[in-house]
Amino acid sequence: MPKVGILTGGGDCPGLNAVIRAVAKTLWPQGYEVIGFLDGFAGLVEGRYLKLDNPSISGLLHRGGTILGTNNRNDPFHYPVRKNGQLTYQDMSDVAIENLARLGIESLIVVGGDGSLSIAREFKEKKGLNVIGVPKTIDNDLASTDQTFGFDTALATATDALDKLHTTAESHHRVMVLELMGRYAGWIALESGLAGGADVILIPEIPWNIDSVVRKILDRKNQGKPFSIVVVAEGVKSPSGELVVRQTIPDSAERLRLGGIGELVAKMIEERTQIETRTTVLGHIQRGGSPSPFDRILATRLGVAAAMAAVQHNYGIMVSLKGQNIVPVPLEEATSKLRQVPVDSQLIQAARAIGICLGD
């Protein structure tokens, strides 16, 4: 019986389990056995896995997270190993290849963001591994796909938070600053800000200045609206052009843990307006919970497409949403750059047209 492996890497997001389910349910009738590696590439290196059967995927469609586990630290080409109490890094990619060969796995489906898919591409280029990528991230920042699953659910979560912040902001005549995830792309902040009625939206793609933000807030106060909602993406730089970093993790694919820009913006607003300003950091709530109907469907379609690519021996690709269709794109193209918000996009134009301040 031919075998296909699958792993989930990087940060978790709603819809991962739906992909796992779709891959297994598509491959079984084709005569394949499906092996799920645990905790991302760590399971591949350490030989930890489970056979995906009917009981293991039962009830997965609506469940958040991933039954396989995930991490964003264990790159097989730069793998953390402790020797005599000291942390060192070794190339363990050959061990991963040996584990795949020992199990008789002919191809590997990697579900992940730019970091995990870049590792998949490295396996293809350096080791000749038959890999298929599935795009996953709440940040929606992967090139070569119109949207990633997980984004729609995170967007709904952020919009719900804004709805709740509106009522308390209005009651207390405060400015409420909501800091959202997204890394170096402003998709979550921009779209939730539009959907949630934000007055100011700051995203990494548009440099901002505090005078513009203050002017918007004071104009609203003068119009009889003594409260405002400000949405800030975590990747927004300070007015002096520096990233605001909460923590640095040397052995992580994402070394810089962004965080703190919301508090910085809030402090600057309160100092200049004398209006009480509070900050909410939504954080990992954006990653959790059941996937939205859109994400369940998109994740299922991507899982089916990845499974059929394995059956057809179509390797070195990422399955991608283009318009209404799922199509294969070269893995090199998919990992070549981040997908940021175009500053001349219709979303930006719509925000400006209805009076939202973008900080510039």
Image (spheres, helix red, strand yellow):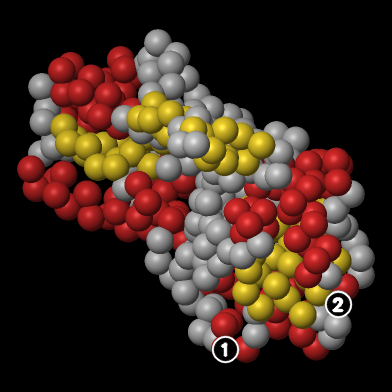
Name which residue type carries label 1: Pro
Q: Is residue 54 above or below residue 265?
A: below
Q: Position of residue 29 (x, y in %)?
A: 80, 88
Q: Position of residue 55 (x, y in %)?
A: 57, 88
Name which residue type carries label 2: Pro
Q: Looking at the image, which residue is at 86% across and 57% down? A: 130
Q: Looking at the image, which residue is at 37% across and 51% down? A: 284
181 vs 162, nearest the viewer: 181
Label total for image: 2
Q: Position of residue 302 (x, y in %)?
A: 70, 66
Q: In the rendered image, which residue does mark 1 sit on?
A: 55
Q: Earlier in the sequence, mark 2 or mark 1?
A: 2
Mark 2 secondary-structure assignment: loop
Mark 1 secondary-structure assignment: helix
Q: Is residue 145 visible?
A: yes
Q: In the rendered image, which residue does mark 2 sit on?
A: 2
Q: Residues within 10 Å of mark 1 (few under 14, many from 20)?
A: few
In this rendering, position of residue 133 left or right of residue 20: right
284 vs 55, nearest the viewer: 55
Please identify the quadrant where the N terminus is shown.
Answer: bottom right
In this rendering, position of residue 213 left or right of residue 206: left
Res 7 quadrant in image: bottom right
As drawn, the residue found furthest toward the front would be 84
Please identify the quadrant where the C terminus is shown.
Answer: top left
19 vs 239, nearest the viewer: 19
